[in-house]
Amino acid sequence: MARRLTALLSGLLLAGLALLPAAPAGAAAPAEELAELCAELWGGTSPTDEPLAACQWDMEQIGATTDGAHALATGEGVRVGVLDSGVDPTHDDIAPNLDWAASCSFIDDDTPTAAAGEAGNGDCTNKSAVVDVNGHGTHVASTIAAPVSGIGIAGVAPDATLVAIKVCTEAGYCFADSVAAGLRYAGDLGLDVVNLSLFADPYLYYCGNEAEQRAILRELQRATRYAQQRGVLVVASAGNEQADLAHPELDTISPDWPPDTAVEREVGNNCRVAPAELTGVLTVSATGPEELASYSSVGMGVVDVAAPGGDYFAATDTVQDAILGALPNTPNDIFASLDPLEAFLPGLTVVDQGNNYGFLNGTSMAAPHAAGVAALIVEQHPDWSWGAVAAAVRATATEMACPADYVQEEESQIARCYGGEGRTSFFGAGLVDAEAAARR
């Protein structure tokens, strides 16, 4: 999902900027200035004492705070796999909690779009292949488990252990064979939780009446089941396509590889997004600071819970309405694309004590909040099955009613919000609640 996130971001941020002069590169804001800006925007509340915590409205919203969830559980002893574009092992908000020895790249020599050096071929001794050259995986990982260390931000479960399982290329493609291999590896390791902020390429929807798509979907389901049978809770993002996954209508981007082969096709309930619609997956829609995020996909019976994913300019008319997370200190695509915009959008990128951060939004940012909440539950109940942990994430969520004033956006396939007390198509069981989960 990394390249869809980048495309979404580019559309939002570059609109209206075409006539402005080019911004200088390397213009990231210092931490003190951004913290002051965020304090003004969010009323001065901070979930923790970390230097950039004033910008983490998302953690405040779900109770992932020093006096809330973290007084009860921090994820200590819990292992969370991040199936994504890798991580930056040098980043100070990643390294203290990273199991680098177990981290592994499942990009192969023949994986389309793979950059030089990314192909680990499942050889977990090749650590250079796991390094994040996109940026997406590092951001996601920091939301789950950035430590409380006096640097940058804190994650939902700041003492959880991260395992980077690279299944997405620098270009943001997460091909199904890599995803399936990563899920099986997570099962072999016996991880507690895995986060997949992606959909498995090359299809957005896999349709049962197409033999090739049916075979790929079956393999993804088998790999998911393999992980689940070994105790792994699989958490996934619902997607950024503004679709009602319970009533799908149109797919305009599949197949997205090879280039220029996509066809517009009508889709129905014989077609599923993977991993979001795989059996047993905890699927997460995205909210902004105030309501459903404008890009989020939804779906009754598909979305289990909602979590903060951010929504640029939705509440305070700033980019700080998105989610602040770590970006690699090493060269990476997302920081390189955002940092030149810093002069026009102050605080979009920031550096704290030599470490890079940036504001992103997407269901990619929502899912790791739920994965972090699951890690808090696992710490409290290490003997619970993955199904019991998922049930607890749902049961402790704060119910959210359908918005009375919802207006369908022009490009959206979401006609309305439906459901009632206890579950809606937009928010599932409701907004994840880290403090309530830690008390479970």
Image (cartoon, helix red, strand yellow):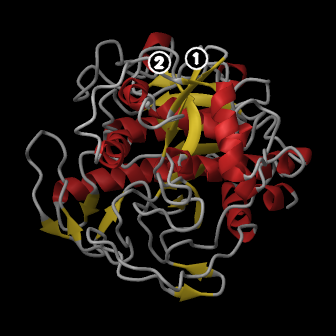
Q: Earlier in the sequence, mark 2 or mark 1?
A: 1
* Image position, residue 148 (x, y; %): 79, 30
Rendered view: 295 above or below 119: below
Q: How many marks?
A: 2
Could one spot residue 231 in this view of the protein? no
Could one spot residue 200 in this view of the protein? yes
Residue drawn where x is 34% and y is 47% of the image = 200
Dot 2 amino acid type: Val
* Image position, residue 224 (x, y; %): 48, 50
- The disc at residue 89 is 1
Residue drawn where x is 34% and y is 18% of the image = 119
Dot 1 amino acid type: Pro
In the displayed structure image, the side of residue 388 where residue 216 appears, left or right: left
Q: In which quarter of the image is the N terminus?
A: top left
* Image position, residue 303 (x, y; %): 51, 68
Q: Is mark 1 on a helix, strand or loop?
A: loop
Q: How far apart are marks 2 and 1 (CA)?
A: 7 Å
Q: Do the residues labelled 2 and 1 touch (CB within 8 Å)?
A: yes
Rendered view: 102 above or below 12: above
Quarter of the image where one finds residue 345: top left
- The disc at residue 131 is 2
Rendered view: 321 above or below 38: below
Q: What element carries label 2?
A: loop
Residue drawn where x is 48% and y is 26% of the image = 86
In the displayed structure image, the side of residue 398 where residue 235 appears, left or right: left
